[in-house]
Each structure stands twice: as structure tokens, then as C-alpha cells.
Image (tube, rainbow, N blue to C red):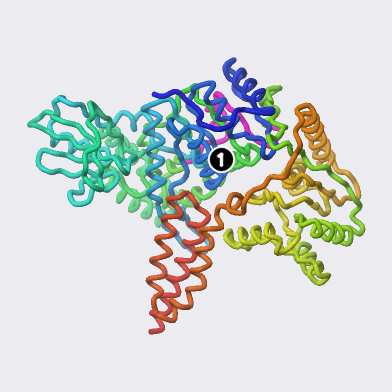
Amino acid sequence: MDPFKIVSDFEPDGDQPGAIRQLTQWLKEGSSRQTLLGVTGSGKTFTIANVIQELQRPAIVIAHNKTLAAQLYNEFKTFFPDNSTGYFVSYYDYYQPEAYLPTTDTFIEKDASINDEIDKMRHSATHALFERRDVVIVASVSCIYGLGSPEAYHGMLLFLENGMTLDRDKALRKLVEIQYKRNDFDLLRGTFRVRGDTVEILPVYERNEAIRVEFFGDEIERLSVFDPLTGSFMRDLDRIAIYPASHYTTPKDKLEEAIVAIQEELRERIQEFRQQNLLLEAQRIEQRTMFDLEMIREMGYCSGIENYSRHLTGRKPGTPPPTLLDYFPDDALIIIDESHVTLPQLNAMYKGDRARKETLVKYGFRLPSAFDNRPLKYEEFENRMNHVIYVSATPGEYEIETSGKKVAELIVRPTGLVDPPIDVRPVKGQVDDLYNEILKGAERDERTLITTLTKRFAEDLTEHYTEMGLKVKYLHSDIVTIERVQIIRELRLGEFDALIGINLLREGLDIPEVSLIAILDADKEGFLRSATSLIQTSGRAARNVSGRVIMYADKVTTGMQKAIDEMERRRTIQEEYNKKHGIKPASIKKSIQEILPMMEPSATVQVVQEEEEEYESGGNLIALADRLEKQMYQAAKDLDFERAAELRDRVKKIRDRELGVAGEG
């Protein structure tokens, strides 16, 4: 195992050394909860990487969506190129959970498209946790969903060593038992092939390194690694452990015990339904469960086997399922990124899952034990958090309370930029006042972001300003990601001067050209005008040296006052630091490609849009769909999920049109 070692051109600067020192000390003292409060652009990820390096402990970083997780994964991989950096998110490109709609008597079968690359990365992550300690895994909130037991996963590995006595056929049976498939023609991930006395295996967590096992009688004569594509030798091995091809792999004896337990639960459930004269439900649960049991007996698994996970792991009803967190050692660090968003998401996951399953259980589509294939309840998640760092620019009351006084701050930005000053102006005449401000900004080649409370007001304001000769656009939820990126690009290029929206907190709006944030109706209390939202929205002006905020309000609410006080506190600290160290703030200069890396891929999509008519007139929709599908899989492989989703929707639309054309013919 290599120790964690950061590779970077930068050294900790500003508030970073102090925050690293504080967090490291608290964790060494055994503290279970601490918070890193870091303003936008202060280097929170770099600070966390330094804490991991100081403590030399495995770490899991939890983000609230796949896109943010992908960005963090790339950052940590850059900081720790010689250590193991893993990525663990839901492996579905598309997922429709099974559901039943009683009003229309409609059962929706589970439908999913699994991303092969992400599945490999999930297996690589769990495999690394058993092999080494220098591991950082970046995960989405899906990491609190049930996963197979780590004891069973590790207990079923196939250990191979040079010179060991092992019957070849026994090794093949073991590979099948841990859910590897035999394929003598094409060596794919999670398969093996047999050529005389040689067995070749491509582990489920690898793509470019396969294992060759050469037998002489009942003895392993040679172990080596080779390239599965070219077949060329890479290196010899003394020993290796082959981990199961599924996280839900179960030993045979446990599988037989599980089958007995499922049969017993099925008998009880059928009896319950019959006593209530629910004969259709009784017949339904019997047919569905017996089919699953037959598959488990014959194949060792069935579709939806996770719904029987309680029996497979031998748990009691209501007990929490094993999750990715159980694969980590007790001293691991848990980093919760953007905790003010991530924690509420984690809290809501159990309730949403339970609500869907209640209908399935009630109408005989699933046994009650399916309830125990679930995400962790929030209190169960809390019990697993031994050493946590909450990371946010605006941590919630919960994070601050549970951390006690252990809050490390990153207030100073390495660029010297300070938080923008806030000006409160009356609501009366806000539209005309803002009109003048947009004009002034346009003269200085600066942009304005305007946030309203309702869609109607945003639309009316856009129309009004356009009629008055201003160049403005409206960003709303119906605009797909690609178009949204294009609008932001046009704003940066100065093709229009102001962008109006309802919730401008979304990722991708940190635009250096924006010097003014205008918050209309700032005194209307609610989620969009809470202290957290106001601070986050105001922070959008913190990338420009002339950045400022205007809040239009007739009274200063509690949320406004909190936001004003907090930003004033930060600005004072930042200005004092700049003065002491002779730092002159400068606006961030970034190319459009750097800020919006998705623009290049989206250009491809736009070209494709233009070509659709040409393909259609040529009757070659199939070729277009195939081409886009390849781009979709490539985008997913590159962890560009938003583009992959956009391409998926376009492929579906073209396939539907293709069917329509065929139908007409």
C-alpha cells in the first residue's frame, strides 16, 4: 500500500493551512462531527485532500448528484494519482422501478439500462477496499441503498496461488458459483474461458487486465496477467484473489437457508390473503415468488433478487441492510459535500422507497420482506457516521449544532476576491431601477443575473425589458441542459446583457462576467428567500472584482439580515487579509471552455439536430439513431451524464419516429 500523497503545483494558502490543522486535530482526538465552512472558490476539495493525506485513512465523499460526484472524482484522482480513487454511483443510465397503479390496475415492470463502465467502477471500488487502505471513493447518495453483505462478498472470493493444489473443474465450478459466466469465444468483463489446461478470467472490476491460470494436472503451474484485447503477456503473478461478479453473491448453504425462509414467508402471506378473501392477490404472490425461487435454485439468482436480500443475508425483519458504508473500516472518514443539500436528500430517501413498495406488497406483487431491501433510515445512517466532515458554503443548523464549536472556516479566496456588498432598495419602482442598472452594466461590458419568485413574473419581466430595448433572456426549468449551457455561453459572450430566472442556484452559473445579482421581492420569506438561498445566490457575483448585490425589499426579514450579516463578516475578514498580505483582487479569467466544458459535446448534438431532416429525407433514421446511441454510451463512459441523458431522449424520439414511418409504409 502506498501512503496518500498529494500531487499538486499548489501549496495550502490563505485560510487553508489553519482549516487543515483544525480538522486533522479534531479527528485525531476522536471527534465524530466537524464542519468545513468554505465560501465559493476557497479550495474546499483541496483542503479535504490535505486532511486525508495528514490522517492516512480511507475516505468516502458523498455528493448529492452524479454530475457533482463525477467532478469530485476527477479532482481527487488528480490530487491522488498514485492512490486508489473510486467512483460509486447508481449504475443505471435509465431506471424505471417496478410499480403498481391500483386505480387503472396497471403493473409496471422494472425496466433498466445498466451502464457497464459504472458497474465496473462500483466493483473496482469495493474490491479496492478489501485490498488496500489508501482509498478515496466518491459516491452519490445512492451509497446508502442496500448492497450485498461485505462478509459474503469477501468470503466467496477465489484465491489462486502459484504451486497450489487445485482441481481445474473445481475452480470452474467456483467461478460459476460467484456468478462468472463461461464464454469460450469472447472474453468479456465478468466471464472466463477454458482452453485445454488454461483458464482465462476477466475480473468484473477490470477491463484491460485479464488473468491466465495454467494448470499442470491438479496444480497451478503459472499465474499471469495479459491484455484481453491483444492476448499479449503483461506480467507474472505469485497469487491473486478473484472477487465475485455480483455484490449479491450468496454461499450455497446460505442460499438454501434463504429458500426455506422465503417459502415460509410465502405460506404465511398466502394464508393472510385467503383469510381476507383476496384470492387474486394470493394467486399472484404465489406465482411470482415460486418463479423466482425456481430461478434461484437453478441459476443462483433471479431478476429482482435484491428484494429477497433480508433472507439472503439472514437478517431479522426491520434491521438495516448492508451498504457501501459497511465495506469501509471503522476509522474511515465520511465527507458530506454540499451538506445543506445532501443531508435532506439522504433523509427523504427511505420514505420515498417505502411509499412505492407498500402498494406492491399490498396487492401481492412482492412479499413483505421486500421492505427490507431499502436505503438506510436517516438515524441508521447517523449511527454509521463515526468520523464526519460536513462541507458547505452555507451549512444548515443541524450541521452546526452537531459539530458543536468544531467549525473550520475557509473565508479567504486565493484570488483575493471578496464577498459582494449588499444594497437593499424599496420594492416600489424595482423594475425601472433595475432597468437603469442593467444599462449601466452593459456599458461596462458586464452582465446581470436577476432572480424572481414566480415563473409568470419572470416571463412578464423578460417581455417588458425586451420591449424597452434591453437584450435579456429567461432561463426556466423546461429548458434542457444543452440549451441551458448555450444560453449561459451567449450571456458570457455578451450576446445579451441580463439573464432572468427563478432559481439561479443551479450548477454552472458561476460566471466571471456577472457583476450584479438582483434579487426581486427579497422580503417574501420562503425557501427561495431563506438565508441559505440568499447567500448562495449572492455568491454568484463573487467571481467579479466589481461584484455587488441588490435586494429589493420593503422590510429586512430574518433571512435577509442573517445573509447580510454573514456576508459582511466574511468580507471584513477577506479585506483585512488582502490588506495585510498586499493582495489586489482580480476578476477570475476563464475561457468559456474551462467554465462550460459541456459546450464542445453539445455542439455535436446541435449538428445532429440540423442533420435530422437530411437523414429523414434519405430514409436513414436507423443510421442516425445508431450513431447517436454510440455517442450516448461514450458520454456515459466519460461520466458526462447530462449529455448522455440528452442523447438517450433524442434516440428514443428518433426510434419512435422510425416506427411511425414504418407504420405508414
Compare residues 84 and 8 and report the one nearer the observer: 8
Instruction: Indicate left or right for 41 with 145 as reference.
Output: right
Residue at the bottom extreme, as displayed: 665
Quadrant position of the N terminus in the picture: top left
Residue 273 drawn above or below residue 198? below
Residue found 42% across the figure and 48% down from its top: 366
Which x, y percent locates residue 546? 79, 46
For label 1, count other residues whose C-alpha is less than 10 Å away and answer few (under 14), some (14-19) or many (20+): many
Residue 392 drawn above or below residue 110? above
Say what amino acid the circle numbered 1 marks: Ala
Which x, y percent locates residue 586? 73, 42
Instruction: Indicate left or right for 165 with 10 as reference.
Output: left
Residue 55 drawn above or below residue 221? above
Quadrant position of the C terminus in the picture: bottom left
Q: Is residue 302 magenta?
A: no
Instruction: Indicate left or right for 109 with 232 as reference.
Output: right
Compare residues 424 and 46 and report the one nearer the observer: 46
Which span is picked out in magenta?
A: 374-398
Tally of numbered discs? 1
Residue found 63% across the figure and 20% down from its top: 21
Compare residues 478 and 613 and report the one nearer the observer: 613
Instruction: State whether residue 474 appears in this view.
Output: yes
Q: Is residue 386 magenta?
A: yes
Which x, y percent locates residue 410? 69, 31
Which x, y percent locates residue 91? 43, 47
Residue 53 drawn above or below residue 173? above
Residue at the top extreme, as displayed: 29
Residue found 50% across the figure and 37% down from its top: 78
Q: Would you name the residue on which mark 1 appears?
A: 63
Compare residues 89 and 274 and report the one nearer the observer: 89
Instruction: State whether residue 144 appears in this view.
Output: no
SS type, badge 1: strand
